[in-house]
Every structure is written in C-alpha cells, then in structure tokens.
Amino acid sequence: MPELFVTNFNSNFTGVSATAAAVLRAQAARRAVALVGHPLPGCPAPITLSRARSLSREAPAGRGFAIWHVRRNTEMRAAIWARDVLGLPLRIVFTSAAQRRHSAFPRWLIGRMDAVIATTDAAARHVPNVHAVVPHGVDCAAFCPATDRAAAWRALGHGGTLGIATIGRIRPEKGTDRFVSAMIGLLPRLPGATALIVGRVTREHRRFADDLRSRIAAAGLTDRIVFAGECTAADLPALMRAMSLVVQLPRYEGFGMVPLEAMASGVPFIGTDAGHFRAFSGNGSAGIVIPPEAAADTAAAILCDPARHARMAQAARQRASATFSAETEAAGIEAVYAGLWSAG
C-alpha cells in the first residue's frame, strides 16, 4: 500500500513536472509511492485518481494516514475532496514556488493544506502554514557535463562552433524578446556562435513570436538565432550539455529550473534577478545575475575568455551537485512528511 501519493494532473511537461519527476525518482527508492494522473519520465507508472482514492480508504501499515503531495490548483481540489468530503485518512502537502500573492481561490485552497513547503524565502512570505523552505533540486545523474562539448554541439546539427540557449515558453514574461535583443548585440562579435530559442509558442503569443522573427531577419541573423521548437524531457539533458551558455532573462519567475539544469550540465548561466537565480549563482562563480541590457556584454566576456568559462562550468556543476540536487530536495520534503506522521 502506498504511503505517499504524488499528483501530476497536467499532461504537458512543465517546470513543475520536471521538479516533481526528479524528486519522485528519489522518493521511490525510499518508500512505497504512487504517481497519480499523467506519466512522468523515469517514475512509476501512474494510477488514476479513482484508484488513488480507493487505495487511500485505509491508512498504510504503521501510519495514521497517507500523504498526498500536490503542486497545482486542480490537484489541491482533488485532495481536499478526498480528505474532507470522502473522509479518507490522508494529509495534504503543497509545494509553493510563486513569489507573489496568489489570487483568491488558490489562497482558499492553500489555506486548507496540512503543510506547505515553499521553495524560497520569498515564496514563503505569500502562503500560510509553511512547514519548511526547500529549494527545488535537479537530477544530477540525468543532467551531467558532456565529455566533449564541441562534439555534443555538432551532434545537434545547428551549425557553428558553440551554442547559446534560452529555454521556456515564448512569451514576454519569459523575456524571449530580451534574449533576442541580447543575441542581436552579441552574435556579430562571436562568428561561430548560434543562439537557440527553445520552447513552445502558444496561440496567444504567435504575434509576439512573429515580431521576434521580423527583428531577427532585419538584423540578418535568421540562420544564427534559431527557433528550435519545444524540447522533450527525454531530449533536454543532451541539448543542455551541448550548450556553452544559457541565458534566461525573465520578467517574472517563480523559481526557475533552467539555470539549475544548465549548472548540473556544466554550463554557466546569465540571468535577470528573478526566481531563485541569485542563490544559484554562487556570487558569480556559477552564473551571473545582470540587468537585461547587460546580457550581451556579459555573455561576450564569458565566452571570449576560455579559462573563465572553464572555471564557471566546473563551479556550476559542483554547486548544483552539492547544494541543489534532487536528493537534497527530497530529503527536505521527507522531513516535512516525518513531522506530519509523528504528530499523528
């Protein structure tokens, strides 16, 4: 009988999905767990919500209740229904990454959680009942440095001698336009570099993406600033380890896994002061937090200095492994579970 039910009700693979999957893989090695909803890579085969309710009718052996760990509004609603309407013996843990005030309905849902885990101190200020602040972690086995970065880049087939990427849905909030501006300023200084815009364009942002394509064409860089489309979870580690630099310039980010995935892959990052980027950076050893208008010059300074780039790449991997691994996150979450179970 599962002690822990981890929900994933979003069929798309998002940043939330990535963090849930990395932690669940670590948790599955420690205890009986069930994934509820949609599949996650490398995780146990999912069960239906109906099956999760059925398995939660009785408390697991040696426990007073099972724990449902949720990360989205729909998942909170389902768990509250199971606990409060169906009367099942369970407790609900919610992970909150948002660094801004939630709207009214999510606040109502969050207020009914048995425990809240915030991913940052800033996120903790916007939610009640915080039991712990546990930053997200990255799977350092899946995301690892390339033995030959140049060969890894050539294998992607985008041309040039090195790659720079921004990764995420193409929209203003993610700062895709800022990346384009930076690359228009940078690429003429780096003849071998190719910039990748990796992510999906949703219907409401097609005009935004078209405007970016027009700017790129006007700069004569259509072949060097490439819209690479969405990358699957399975393909992302290979793409990441082929990069020489990751540039994330969002206007808002709740946490931001991309710099961590880059760091674990031995890739330095440049980012705006959003999400948890400043904590990742190691005071500039692994990444650099800058205003967006400084991105081109900062990238040039790193990429034109091979010794500095190598130091940052090594520091990035070490920092991800030592401080921001999925195993570290899982241990912090397990402490919250243990507190709930011991309290009865």
Image (spheres, rainbow, N blue to C red):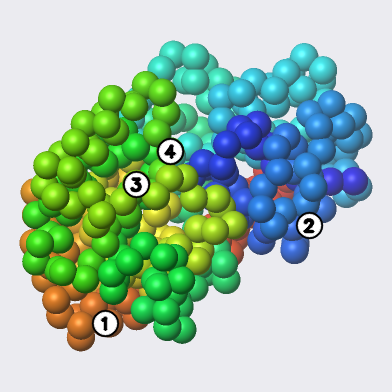
Rendered image quadrant of residue 57: top right
How far apart marks 4 and 3 lie (CA) works out to 9 Å
Residue 200: give its label: 4
Quarter occupied by the C terminus: top right
Residue shown at 88% from the left, 49% from the top: 62
Q: Which mark, by number, is residue 138?
A: none
Say what amino acid the circle numbered 3 marks.
Answer: Phe
Secondary structure type for disc 4:
loop
The residues tagged by marks 4 and 1 sit, at their Cα atoms, a distance apart of 32 Å
Identify residue for label 3: 227
Q: In front: mark 1 or mark 2? A: 1
What secondary structure is found at the residue carrying circle 1? helix
Element assignment for label 2: loop
Q: In this view, does 20 lie to the left or right of 32?
A: left
Amino acid type, callout 2: Arg
First in sequence, mark 2 or 4: give its number: 2
Q: Earlier in the sequence, mark 1 or mark 2?
A: 2
Query: Marks 3 and 4: in contact by CB < 8 Å?
Result: no
Q: Name the residue carrying label 1.
A: 311
Q: Which of marks 2 and 3 is nearer the N terminus?
A: 2
Q: Which of marks 2 and 3 is in front?
A: 3
Residue 31: assigned label: 2
Per the model, the C-alpha gap separating discs 1 and 3 is 30 Å
Q: Quadrant of residue 145?
A: bottom left
Tell me the mark number nearer the camera, choosing from 1 and 3.
3
Image vertical order of residue 59 relative to residue 165, above or below: above
